[in-house]
Image (cartoon, helix red, strand yellow):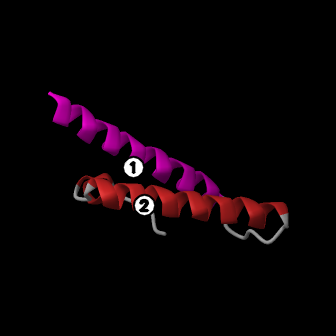
Amino acid sequence: MAKLKVEDIRAMSEDQMSDAIVGLKKERFNLRFQRATGQLENTSRLREARRDIARVKTVAAQKRAAKTK
């Protein structure tokens, strides 16, 4: 996946966000596996994937907080 932008994430529904989180976690697992076996070429992608997960979770939490108000 490419780096997710906040505007794109905010346009997603809750289901799309949860699907994105699952996909990013799978990608992160695969990247970690590639790193462990010495096959990872772009090591910065691990950091980007971790931050993308955090970005999606943050926007999801903001949407949930806005609903309760």
Dot 2: within a 10 Å radius of its alpha carbon, few (fewer than 14), some, or many (20 or more) residues? many
Q: Is the magenta stretch mostly helix, strand or loop?
A: helix
Dot 1: within a 10 Å radius of its alpha carbon, few (fewer than 14), some, or many (20 or more) residues? many
Looking at the picture, does residue 33 appear above or below residue 53? below
> Residue 48: where, in percent of width, then height?
54, 55
Tag 2 residue: 20
In front: 22, or 2? 22
Tag 1 residue: 56
Look at the numbered disc 2 and give the secondary structure of its residue: helix
> Residue 11: where, in percent of width, then height?
22, 58
Confirm whether the magenta stretch covers residue 68. Answer: yes
Q: Earlier in the sequence, mark 2 or mark 1?
A: 2
**Residue under the image location 76 percent in, 63 percent down:** 33
In front: 53, or 41? 53
Left of 48 or right of it: where is 32? Answer: right
**Residue under the image location 29 percent in, 53 percent down:** 14
Contact, mark 2 vs mark 1 (Cβ under 8 Å) = yes
> Residue 20: where, in percent of width, then height?
42, 61
**Residue under the image location 48 percent in, 50 percent down:** 53
* Image quarter (top left, top right, bottom left or bottom right) of the C terminus: top left
Quadrant assignment, res 63: top left
Q: From which residue to which does the magenta span run?
A: 44-69
Look at the numbered disc 1 and give the secondary structure of its residue: helix
Count of numbered marks: 2
> Residue 60: where, in percent of width, then height?
33, 44
**Residue under the image location 76 percent in, 67 percent down:** 34
- Looking at the rendered structure, the kind of residue marked 1 is Val
> Farthest residue in the top direction?
69
- Looking at the rendered structure, the kind of residue marked 2 is Ala
Looking at the picture, does residue 35 appear above or below residue 56? below
Q: Distance between the residues labelled 2 and 1?
A: 8 Å
